[in-house]
Amino acid sequence: MNSNVIFLLLIIAIALSFWAQFKVKGTFNRFAKVPNLYGLTGHDAARRMLDANGLYDIPIEPVRGSLTDHYDPMKRVVRLSEPVFYENSISSVAVACHEVGHAIQHKESYSMLVLRHKMFPVVNLTSRVSPFLILAGFIFGALNLAWVGVFFFSFAVLFQLVTLPVEFDATHRARKGMLSLGLVSHSEEQQVGKVLNAAALTYVAAALISLLELLRFVMILLESRARE
């Protein structure tokens, strides 16, 4: 497999990423129009799931934007986009409980989440430096410098791969919690799953793009060295 083949695969992966983003927005908007059976807002569902897991001290805050929902491990707060926070849709409950899943991971020191947090400072630095090192290496013909850049870039790829089990586990916790706590009915489980699975596709696509981009850099450098 040469760099041209990997480049073609990279283009396909990028197309998959755009499709995944389109799908998650479409699925979210579709089920944002479907009220859940028990009339729970995203805030209600998140609060119940947090309390059921002994996380009474974790606040829930609304934030502006769409699909800006996240759990902040530094400040230990669940932040939900305004549509999720205030509305009582299938999408609202699904997304809110997914973010609570991360809070539960934090409480239980879930191994992959701990690893992800430890990696973040390193990745934050290497991901900024690596493009300049790779570019400079190619411009000035300094392949060793480019290899250092590729090595730094590999940390970002590893970070993306570690993110996958973190997100999948949070989704599993959300689905299990929603059913056991009676936040959704069994008839709504499939709809909730569609929302969460669509979101998971975006992480899969991002990891695939990063991995293929890393392989492409490696192949280009190997081919450059072979021509020397």
Image: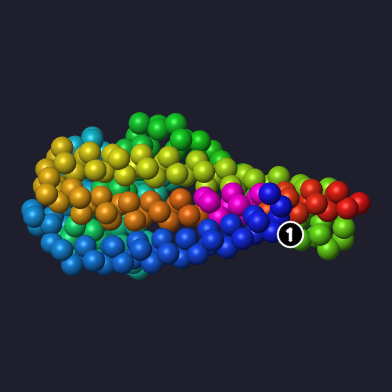
Question: Dividing the picture into quarters, in which one does residue 173 lie?
Answer: top left
Q: Is the magenta stretch mostly helix, strand or loop?
A: helix
Whether residue 54 can be seen here:
yes
Q: Is residue 95 magenta?
A: no
Q: Can you say whether 173 is above or below 33 in the image?
A: above
* Residue behind mark 1: 132
Q: At x 71% / y 52%, what residue is drawn?
A: 2
* Residue 174 placement (x, y as % from top left): 26, 43
Q: At x 34% / y 56%, what residue is drawn?
A: 198
* Residue 4 placement (x, y as % from top left): 69, 59
Q: Can you say whether 102 is above or below 32 in the image?
A: above
- Element type at mark 1: helix
Looking at the image, residue 79 sits to the left or right of residue 118; the answer is left
In the image, the segment drawn in magenta is: 207-215
Q: Can you say whether 45 is above or below 51 in the image?
A: below
Looking at the image, residue 130 sits to the left or right of residue 57; the answer is right
| Circle count | 1
Q: Does the magenta stretch include residue 209?
A: yes
Q: Which of 148 and 208 is in front in this view?
A: 208
Q: At x 31% / y 38%, what residue is drawn?
A: 104
The amino acid at mark 1 is Phe
Looking at the image, residue 228 sits to the left or right of residue 159; the answer is right
* Residue 56 placement (x, y as % from top left): 23, 40
* Residue 136 placement (x, y as % from top left): 80, 60
Crowding at mark 1 (Cα within 10 Å: few <14, some 14-19, many 20+): some
Question: Dividing the picture into quarters, in which one does residue 52 lie?
Answer: top left
Whether residue 153 can be seen here:
no
